[in-house]
Image: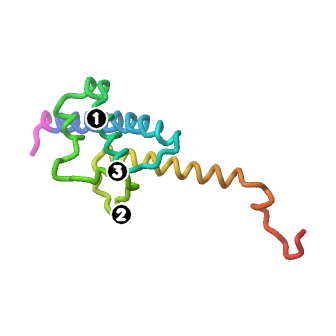
Amino acid sequence: MNSPSTDSDAALAALRYRHAARDLEHIVRRIASRYIAQHVPLTWRLLHAIEAEALADLGFASRHDALMLGLFQRPTGLPYPETDDLVNFGTSNALPAVFAFAVVAYEQAQQGASQLAARTQPTRSRRRTRAWGG
């Protein structure tokens, strides 16, 4: 059986990790939003640039210790292309944290744009047309 001290240490570590993950997600979304606003597509090269900028953020580094920062580093055994091809993970759901946060930001922006386009279509094209044209 775990001692109360061990349980509270584990709970504290989990809380610190969740806080760091939310912090990093906020940073990645801020970085990605600059590119989304300019309509820059998410390429592998851009994804690597977002990752490098997010992990080098001085505020992030100052708020979390080195051990915590290391948890968000992409393992060297997980190489990804560094090309100008559009990002496609296929059916994979095992992504480094920064990659996952950036992909979600781009997907949400695309959904928002699609919803906005659907709402701003002219009323005539959304109206059900009658066979007699009226």
Residue 67 among magenta residues: no
The x and y percentages for residue 118 are 66, 55
- Which residue position is annotated with label 3? 44
> Closer to the camera, 79 or 84?
84
What's the CA distance linking mark 1 and mark 3? 17 Å
105 left or right, relative to 5: right
What's the CA distance linking mark 1 and mark 2? 25 Å
> Closer to the camera, 39 or 20?
39
Q: Are marks 3 and 2 in contact (CB under 8 Å)?
A: no
Q: Which residues are magenta?
A: 1-6
When asked about the image quadrant of residue 52, the answer is: top left
Q: Type of residue at label 1?
A: Leu
- Which residue position is annotated with label 1? 55
Q: Secondary structure at mark 3?
A: helix
Which numbered disc, 3 or 2, marks the residue closer to the eye? 3
Q: Tag on residue 90?
A: 2
Quadrant for the C terminus, please: bottom right
The x and y percentages for residue 77 are 16, 52
Which numbered disc, 1 or 3, marks the residue closer to the eye? 3
Q: Type of residue at label 3?
A: Trp
The x and y percentages for residue 57 are 31, 29
Q: Residues within 10 Å of mark 2 (few under 14, many from 20)?
A: few
Q: Secondary structure at mark 2?
A: loop
Q: Type of residue at label 2?
A: Gly
